Image (tube, rainbow, N blue to C red):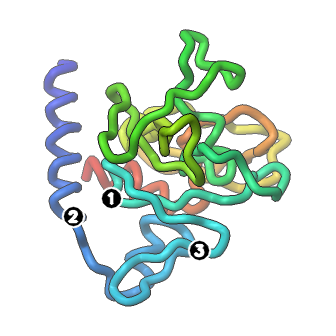
Amino acid sequence: MKTALLSLILFSCHIWAVKHQAKKCTEDRECEEIWPGSTCQRARCRCPENYVRRKSPSREWVCLSVNDAATGQVGPPLTCPLPDGAGYQVILRGSSTNNLLSPPVLCSSKTNDCETGYECIQGLSPVDGLDGACCPDQITTCAHPIFDHESGTLERWGFDGSECVKFKWDPEKPSSANNFKTKLQCESYCVNIFA
């Protein structure tokens, strides 16, 4: 059963990758589906202000927030795209407990040398000669649990295994990568890869 599911997932991702490979945009909606606030400029999707575009092996491209979601100040040099502005919470860590005090697993965005389920996303600036951190890939992101914070003030969307559901997020509390700004982004990330 596990082999069949893994084969289906890999086949779905291959079809998605072929479909989205080096695709040029013609309108903002195409970019907005991948990242909220992105626009189509000269046939290429551009990230919104205070974000930088980075290559993603599983998504073609993602946007990294320059600012920390909790403080509004400039965030750490290494972060993941999700949760938006708090991606440092989900970087693969070098210990079995994987807590925020353990050192992050660094990588080279040119070789994508992360373990299965993670991909190398180039950071905002290099650390120790390496330019990226191992972040959850598309499938791992969608498999993460949803952290619904009752005290949360920000509305977010997460994939519950079959559909995207609304929840409340507090960026000052631990979270997972399964945390999207819009339902459209959640569906693009999770629902549509299995369609």
Query: What is the crowding at mark 1: few (fewer than 14 residues within 10 Å), some, or many (at least 20)?
Result: some
Q: Which residue is mark 1?
A: 60
Depth check: give the residue in front, 185 or 18.
18
Q: Residue furthest top?
A: 96
Q: CA distance from mark 3 to mark 2?
A: 22 Å
Determine the residue positioned at 15% across, 53% down. 15
Regarding mark 1 in the picture, which secondary structure is present there?
A: strand
Which badge, 1 or 3, is on the more N-terminal residue? 3
Height in image: 51 above or below 187?
Answer: below
**Left or right for 44, reference 38:** left
Q: Which residue is mark 2?
A: 21
Q: Amino acid at mark 2?
A: Gln
Q: Position of residue 75 (x, y in %)?
A: 73, 51
Determine the residue positioned at 21% across, 28% down. 5
Q: Position of residue 77 (x, y in %)?
A: 64, 47
Q: Position of residue 36 (x, y in %)?
A: 55, 69
Q: Which residue is mark 3?
A: 48
Q: CA distance from mark 1 to mark 2?
A: 7 Å
Q: Is there any visible trace of residue 160 in the rendered image?
A: no
Regarding mark 3 in the picture, which secondary structure is present there?
A: loop
Which badge, 3 or 2, is on the more N-terminal residue? 2
Q: Amino acid at mark 3?
A: Pro
Query: What is the crowding at mark 2: few (fewer than 14 residues within 10 Å), some, or many (at least 20)?
Result: few
Query: What is the crowding at mark 3: few (fewer than 14 residues within 10 Å), some, or many (at least 20)?
Result: some
Q: CA distance from mark 1 to mark 3?
A: 17 Å
- In terms of image quadrants, where is residue 120? top left
Regarding mark 2 in the picture, which secondary structure is present there?
A: loop
Determine the residue positioned at 62% across, 23% down. 103
**Left or right for 20, reference 25:** left
Quadrant containing the N terminus is top left
**Left or right for 43, reference 153:** left
